[in-house]
Each structure stands twice: as C-alpha cells, then as structure tokens.
Image (cartoon, grey):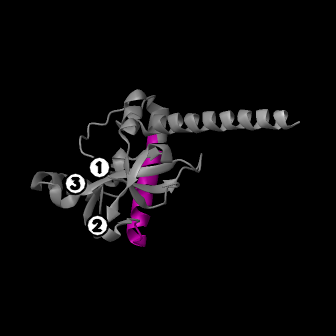
Amino acid sequence: MSTINEKGIYFAKNEFYEIIKKVGGEWNDTKFRPLVALFESTEHPDIYWAVPMGDYSHRNENAKKRIKSFLGRDDKDIASCFYHIGKTDKKSIFFISDAVPITLKYIEREYLVGPKESQQAYIIKNPNLISELERKVGRVISFEKVYTKAEGHPKFRQRMLDIHEYLLSELTDIAVQNTVIEDNEVKRER
C-alpha cells in the first residue's frame, strides 16, 4: 500500500495510539477498530481526517439507546454530530467525536471484504453517507478549534488538534531532511 484512498477503511498501527498518549490524549478503546480515512487535511495532503467505526449490531440495547439519544438531538447541538449510523459492508456506527488525523506511516493494513481468494479493500461510495460523515466531522473539528481557543484546552479526549500538529511537525521534519539530502547530492555533483 503506497497511498491512502479517500473514503477507504484501514486499521492503524499500535504506535499511532501511542502518539495519542504522547500528546496527552486518551484512547481507551481496547478493540482493534477500523478507521475510515474521510478527507485530506487542508494543512497537508498527507494527513487524512479519519473516523473510528464499529459494527452496530455488537451494541447492547442501552448503548443503542444512548447513541440514538445523541442522533435525536437538534442539529444545532454539536452533540448531534458525535455519532453516525450508516451502511458499509454492514450496519456501522461511526464515532465522529473520536475523529483523528492520520498519515500513511501509521496505517497497518486495509479493511478487506469479500471471499478470502478475492478480497478487496473497502471504500465507502454512498454519497449520502459520505456527505453526512464529512458534515459531522467538519463541525466537530471546527468546534474543537473554537473551544480550544476559548477554553485553553480541548473538549475531546483524544486531542485531535494536538495529534494533527504532531503529524504536521513530523511531515515537516521529513521534508526538511529530504531537502538537505537533495542539496548535498547537488553539491557533490558539481
């Protein structure tokens, strides 16, 4: 795998979850949960905003009732964006409030579907699902930026903006190193 496909579903490496802890965030999910790489960051094309997801049928009745209580809130209420239910290869729950930025470096593997001999990477193609996920993730990111600026600390436990800054710094460091290497090669050729 050499690129991230927008709307593709992936599994992150364990070291990605260590970054969340490194920047002071929390990630208590013990399940190996897939992430949908929804869209590129406006700050860097190698960073994608991703949303953890799970199988809706694995939720007990209390969890389903709780999720529906969020989904039933007024659209003006940011909490109405914390979850989304949609169909992928099964009825899925998207944990929008746990959105994280990610890069290819931290992708372990693709989410594959189909018979074992002909499995393919799953990419979400439903335009209505994509539109709602993008709308909700966009609102959550915007809310987090405003909230963090006003309150001096993030609202969401994973510290999505701090992760983004970490990844941006990491990519910038790599770009600088590559420039130095290229400059040294040019000097040697002269």
* Separation of residues labelled 1 and 3 (CA atoms): 18 Å
**29 w.r.t. 58: above or below:** above
Residue 124 x, y percent position in the rendering: 40, 66
Q: Is residue 69 visible?
A: yes
Q: Earlier in the sequence, mark 1 or mark 3?
A: 1
Residue situated in front as seen by the camera: 13 or 69: 13
Query: What residue sits right under mark 3 in the picture?
Result: 67
Residue 103 among magenta residues: no
Spot occupied by residue 131 in the image (x, y as percentages of width and height): 43, 65
Q: Secondary structure at mark 1?
A: loop
- Front in this rendered view, residue 38 or 3: 3
Q: Circle 3: is it few (<14), some (14-19), or many (20+) Cα within 10 Å? A: some
Region rendered in magenta: 124-144
User: Gap between marks 3 and 2, in whole Å?
Assistant: 33 Å
Label whose residue precedes the other's in the sequence (3 or 2): 3
Label 2 and label 1: CA atoms lie apart by 20 Å
Give the residue at mark 1. 33
Rendered-image quadrant of the C terminus = top right
Amino acid bearing label 3: Ile
Magenta-colored stretch includes residue 133? yes
Q: For mark 1, does the 10 Å Cα neighbourhood hold few (<14), some (14 to 19), or many (20 or more) residues?
A: some
Q: How many marks?
A: 3
